[in-house]
Image: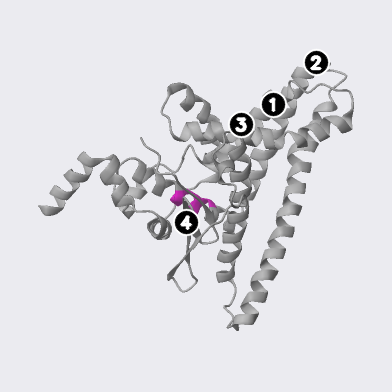
Amino acid sequence: MKSSNVGGQAVLEGVMMKHKDRYAVAVRKPDGTVVVEQDDYKSIVGSHQKLLKTPFIRGIFNFIDSMILGMKTLTWSAGFEEEEEVLTEKEARKREKLDQVINGVVMAVSFLIAIAIFMVLPYFLSDLFKTVIPSYVIRTILEGVIRILIFVGYIWLISRMEDIRRLYQYHGAEHKCINCIEHGLPLTVDNVRISSKEHKRCGTSFLMFVMIVGIVLLFFVQTESHILRVVIRIALLPVIAGISYEIIRLAGNSDNVVVNLLSRPGLMLQGLTTKEPDDSMIEVAIASVEAVFDWKAYLAENFPVREESGRKEEAV
């Protein structure tokens, strides 16, 4: 199976899909119509494109890019939940700049909160067992287990909210569309419906790899200073992200037994972050894919026999 290199994420009542430097957001408005927005995305690396091709380094910038694009498209989709305002061109520019500032602040605050909850808190909780668990290696494993439990608990807790549940359904629709075309099926509602809602290149799997890789790397960080241990954990985040990106990139392009085994924890976690979508959600996801990716050309190139068979069936 050849990767389509299509990726995306769920947004409020819609799906964002990205292929190379193009992305599209399809959203179902309150009146039932589907609106699609397309644009180019310029990476934060600017003209230094080699950074996006350098192993281990590219993962860091791809992660940052995905956060920026994700926040931008999520904010855009949220606008349809409010009453649409008629703005002048000047007011629209001011609103866009304000949204950019707000997004930047939200991302910064969210990052700090995530560091505190998922990096610092597990460390101090595991350190409480220092008297009964003198082994640094075992406490590091315990720290990783606590981190995973907090993460899974957080995902499960927010999944109880109706809006988040719908977001997870759109997440499932996104995966189903990608799985549909990568398994050689035409992108139709019927074919997407029967496709898997789990995918090895998912961001959920990436975060699971981040936690697992973090456990391994922290085995080699041994110091008595609490402050230094926390600082090192934060400083290692880019390294952990870079390694995790390479693993998930390999997983998305390989059907190797070992790679599939390593992918299982992330796929299991996707059982929480993806839900079965209805047909209207699938239609939105298909619209997003078709805005940035020629799936018919992809099928013709990678599944020529099946494509030819499909043409004969249509002729009959």
Residue 131 in sight here? yes
Give the distance between the C-alpha atoms of the residues marked 3 and 2, in whole angstroms. Answer: 26 Å
**Could you say which is closer to the camera, residue 22 or residue 303?**
22
* Lower sequence index among marks 4 and 3: 4
Residue 15: where, in percent of width, then height?
Answer: 49, 57
Amino acid on which disc 2 is placed: Ser
Q: Is residue 66 left or right of residue 200?
A: right
Give the distance between the C-alpha atoms of the residues marked 4 and 2, in whole angstroms. Answer: 50 Å
Q: Residue at x 73, y 48 (%)?
A: 111
- Which of the 4 image quarters holds residue 59? top right
Give the distance between the C-alpha atoms of the residues marked 4 and 1, in whole angstroms. Answer: 35 Å
- Which of the 4 image quarters holds residue 3? top left
Query: Would you name the residue on which mark 2 appears?
Result: 135
**Could you say which is closer to the camera, residue 316 or residue 298?**
298
Give the distance between the C-alpha atoms of the residues marked 1 and 2, in whole angstroms. Answer: 14 Å
Q: Nearer the viewer, mark 1 or mark 3?
A: 3
Q: Please, what secondary structure does the residue beneath circle 1 have?
A: helix
Give the distance between the C-alpha atoms of the residues marked 1 and 3, in whole angstroms. Answer: 13 Å
Query: Would you name the residue on which mark 4 appears?
Result: 22
- Which of the 4 image quarters holds residue 188? bottom left
Amino acid on which disc 4 is placed: Arg
Give the distance between the C-alpha atoms of the residues marked 4 and 3, in whole angstroms. Answer: 25 Å
Residue 276 in sight here? no
Residue 72: where, in percent of width, then height?
Answer: 60, 60
Residue 158: where, in percent of width, then height?
Answer: 64, 50
Amino acid on which disc 3 is placed: Ile
Give yes or no for contact between labels 4 and 1 (Cβ–Cβ under 8 Å).
no
Q: Is residue 218 left or right of residue 81?
A: right
Q: Nearer the viewer, mark 4 or mark 2?
A: 4
